Amino acid sequence: MAATLKDVAALAGVSIKTVSNVVNGYGFVKPENRRRVEEALEATGYRPNVGARNLRRGRTGFIAMVVPELSVPYFGELVSLVISAAADHDWNVLIEQTQGVRDRERDALSALGPHMVDGAILSPEALTAEDLAVLDPGVPFVMLGEHSVHAAADHVAIDNVAAAKTAVAHLAALGRTRIAAIGANPARGTATLRLRGYTEALTEAGLPINETLIAPAAKYHRREGAQAMATFLDLPEPPDAVFCFNDLLAIGALRTAADRGLWVPEDLAVVGFDNIEESAYAIPRLTTVAPDKQAIAETAVNLLHSRVVDRDNREPQTIQAAFRLEVRGSSRPRAATRSPRP
């Protein structure tokens, strides 16, 4: 039979109220009483009824996280970080995958509500301002990523224009003059911003903007990166560097370059975006823009907690997380001699 608060109180020699205060994390308990209660909790194996506790607090104990694709490692890594941050606030996380399709994002939004979750973290690709106005989820939510949609909600993102400019300026500083881009997609807000950063960096470096060196990508998968790189390499004047709008596109581009007998970075420098774990194990290791994913996850969860638990009614705020350029082997300066392939 499961231990009860009464059992713990009897073993510790304190009141049931004192046990309840310790279990719920309240600070006003004498150190000696807290020690005795904690020992009794361990001895009896008491486990609190989280559902009942949340019901008393008027909370569900769950938050939702809505992302486009878990198969894209950036989102998988971000979800894992959000789960860890949410656990610090005694929240469980419900995950919804939308494939970036507007109808599925609308369905996910309309399914939220105070009967289901305490709040939500949204990373949409296709939602419009009208969608958010009509489909008010009825719970606090935080938006991730830069979008053209201006919702009355807290927002956590990095500066995609500045990040893309940093990546392309790095390639230009290496002496690369035909710098291509893979990932243009007008339906993606982040893609539009990264493309803007790419073109601004070229202009500032005194390099021309060549439309034949800008490849679209409906999906940000390895296949699309490989196919775009093949198209570039078939040009009469192929690029000597490529900036990819995520790491999977860059890894696909690396595969095509290797298949065509090119040396990276001697013949072709490659830079990605997201700093997924796989990027550090590519051959060569991939230079990439590294958003502070830990900060993005923790900031989003903390903002949500302030709305749900602290009842913070301040004006919505936009917080920019830091990023850095993680320079690795795929964009070293050209060597005088080629090192053997691994």
Image (cartoon, rainbow, N blue to C red):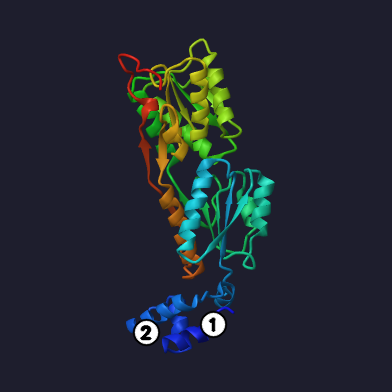
Q: Is residue 167 above or below residue 156?
A: above
Q: Amino acid at mark 1?
A: Thr
Mark 2 lies on a secondary structure that is helix
Q: For label 1, count other residues whose C-alpha is less than 10 Å away and answer few (under 14), some (14-19) or many (20+).
A: some
Q: Is residue 329 above or below residue 187?
A: above
Residue receiving disc 2:
33
Q: Amino acid at mark 2?
A: Asn
The reply to whether the C-beta atoms of the residues labelled 1 and 2 are less than 8 Å apart is: no
Question: Horizontal and vertical percent for residue 222?
Answer: 55, 31
Question: Horizontal and vertical percent for residue 126?
Answer: 62, 44
Residue receiving disc 1:
4
Quarter where residue 172 is shown: top left
Quarter where residue 54 is shown: bottom right
Tell me if 334 is positioned left or right of 297 in this view: left
Work out whether residue 316 can be spotted.
no
> What residue appears at the point 52 percent right and 31 percent down from the top-left corner?
249
Mark 1 lies on a secondary structure that is loop
Of label 1 and label 2, which has the lower sequence position? 1
